Image (tube, helix red, strand yellow):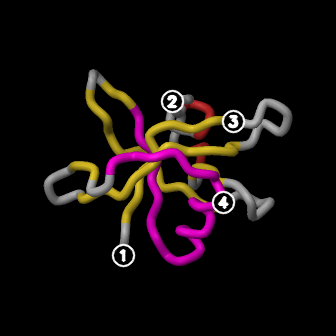
Amino acid sequence: MSMYAIDAIRMNPNSGQVERVRWGKVDLAPNHWELEPEESDVSEVVRKIQAGAEVRSTFQVGGFTVLGPKLEINRSGQGIEVVDPEQHPGRTINDMLTF
């Protein structure tokens, strides 16, 4: 199974939903980006999740990038959100870096 990580998001100011992401494929064994992060429409993330890929959030902690919670498709079916956000205080979509 492929794993991707999102390191920053861009929110739509009108809807408050994620409209673009900066993301890439990750390799956990050596803990690095397999493909350098690139900008994409959130619909690409939705398609990857629907195809069975795992997509995780990332956060900056003490100068390091760490994997955060897994992301899932939101109720509208067109966006993303953190799985069980109440279990991840400080690690929700709204806490992610923006660009």
**Of marks 3 and 1, which one's residue comes earlier in the chain?**
1
**Which residue carries the number 2 mark?**
97
Q: Which mark is residue 43?
A: 4
Which quadrant is home to the N terminus?
bottom left
User: What secondary structure is found at the residue carrying circle 4?
Assistant: helix
Between marks 1 and 4 in the image, the one whose residue lies nearer the viewer: 4
Give, as a single range, the part of the protein colored magenta: 36-59
Residue appearing at x 16%, y 59% in the figure: 29
Residue appearing at x 74%, y 60% in the figure: 78
**Of marks 1 and 2, which one's residue comes earlier in the chain?**
1
Residue appearing at x 47%, y 59% in the figure: 55
Along the line of sight, the residue nearer the viewer: 22 or 95 = 22
User: What secondary structure is found at the residue carrying circle 1?
Assistant: loop
Residue at mark 3 to residue at mark 4: CA–CA distance: 13 Å
User: What secondary structure is found at the residue carrying circle 2?
Assistant: loop
Side (left or right) of 23 relative to 76: left
- Do residues under tags 2 and 4 come within 8 Å of each other at their CB atoms? no
**Which residue carries the number 1 mark?**
1
- Do residues under tags 3 and 1 come within 8 Å of each other at their CB atoms? no
**Which residue carries the number 3 mark?**
11
Within 10 Å of the Cα at label 1, are there few (<14), some (14-19), or many (20+) other Cα atoms?
few
> Can residue 54 be found in the magenta stretch?
yes
